[in-house]
Image (tube, grey):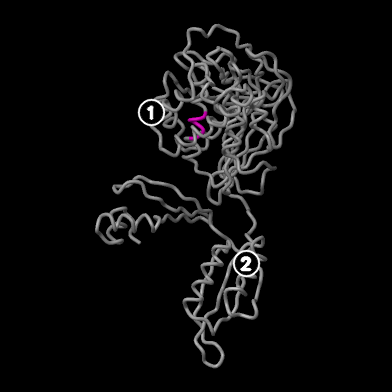
Amino acid sequence: MGAAGDMLTAALMELLPDQESFVRELNGLGIPGVVYKAEKSVKCGITGTQMIVSVNGETEEAGDGGHAHDHEHSHDHDHSHEDAEHAHDHEHSHDHEHGHEDADHDHGYVHDHGHEYEEHAHDHGRSHAGGNGEHHTHDHHHDHAHHHHSSMADIRRIVGNLTVSDKVKEDILAVYALIADAESKVHGVPVEEIHFHEVGSMDAVADVTAVCLLMERLHPDQVIASPVNVGSGHVHCAHGIMPVPAPAAALLLQGIPIYSAAAETELCTPTGAALLRYFVSRFTKMPVMRVQKIGYGCGHKDFETANCLRAMLGDTEEPADSIYELACNLDDMTPEAAAYAQEKILEAGALDVCMIPAQMKKSRPGFILLVQCREQDRDSILPLIFRHTSTIGVRMHECRRFVMNRHAEKVQTPFGEVRRKVSEGFGVTREKYEYDDIARIADEKGISLAEVMQALGDNR
């Protein structure tokens, strides 16, 4: 398993209340020939967990859990790294996750207004077969002729048979698609012609699957990672000697802040880079946060600095959001014209538009039009208020607002797949089924909205 991938898995797993049951769950997923094993390890006096992954009884050579994913094209057993090394599973929804494999990189924050703060320590530095701060200088020149090579179609079939949720499957394939696309561009061949060596590909699937499953389990609001230490030196592969970061990793890291420090070794592999790109919301220094739990994922190799990844779960102190309110009084418009104006303003990007009944001057019944918008939309919405209403003046003031973190998910119900909105923050969690889905089910089944809600276990 890739140092970054296995280290990230180990660090995130330490944030769970029952690590042993999670390892059993991993071993029951159905990844062909893969066996996960968690062991306690000490790096520079720091005690953490080390994940060891074997494929058909053998581990990837460079002992540091490096996925020496041999990406080949044209079935030519050429290995081009594909290490699931840095699975920086960072999400930011107030949940930051950082993590670099070097102990130096004690990044990993997951703020989560009541969520987890995870730090994905990228297991940087692993030999192509073993992440954790090892050299990816793996000479994959051993004879793999007896191994089967998997294509992206094979990977999709393997993932399709895993006993995980549809969301986890989507995440796994999305990460793999990033890797395959990068390898495709580097080697100049179509994605479907990229092939992965059996041990390396299963090792990578194991790392990516574990990280995606942990991200679902921990469900951070957001993941924040520190700038990525890519290591230095060169890596040896079937295509020749290449500089660190490897070409595919460099491509995946475009736009992400990176630097080179510590030992001469590959610290960020293509798999790790793909995980970072997929899960991390932003790369920055650790934010102000209240840490709830800390996990350490240890690599297989030893360096002067602790070869471990730290994941931190906690609540961030995020600043309040800022919006503008635009308001005007209307006493000479028809309800139809007011409704039309409301539609046009919403189409222009307003956050909310409402008409508040009010008693105007001369005892006329009328409305107060109240528009909420972001600063960047203010100047385009203001002219629309004058164009589509009868007002001759608009009041404006800036507001500070505090909002819960929101996301939508799809859940399986007796009526099939239904969308559900989840709001979390400030110690509160709320869930609500999407009205349009509930209404559709009620129409299809010939029952009331209340009956649908009751069947779904929602008593609202």
Depth check, front residue: 137 or 173: 173
Q: To which quarter of the image does residue 297 belong?
A: top right
Name the spot of residue 206 as percent of width and height, x first.
49, 25
Q: Quadrant of the C terminus?
A: bottom left
Mark number displayed over residue 161: 1
Q: Residue at x 44, y 14 (%)?
A: 56
Question: Who comes first in sequence, dot 1 or dot 2?
Answer: 1
Depth check, front residue: 247 or 168: 247
Give the amino acid at mark 2: Ile
Q: To which quarter of the image does residue 276 belong?
A: top right
Give the amino acid at mark 1: Asn
Which residue carries the number 2 mark? 381
Q: Secondary structure at mark 1?
A: loop
User: What range of the chain is rendered magenta?
Assistant: 208-212
Q: To which quarter of the image does residue 72 belong?
A: top right
Q: Is residue 272 left or right of residue 245?
A: left
Q: Residue at x 44, y 21 (%)?
A: 35
Name the spot of residue 232 as percent of width and height, x first.
73, 23
Q: Secondary structure at mark 2?
A: helix
- The answer to whether residue 44 is visible is no
Q: Is residue 165 left or right of residue 445?
A: right
Q: Main secondary structure of the magenta part?
A: helix
Name the spot of residue 203 as percent of width and height, x first.
51, 21
| On screen, residue 35 above or below 251 | above
Name the spot of residue 258 as percent of width and height, x first.
71, 33
Alpha carbon separation for disc pair 1 and 2: 50 Å
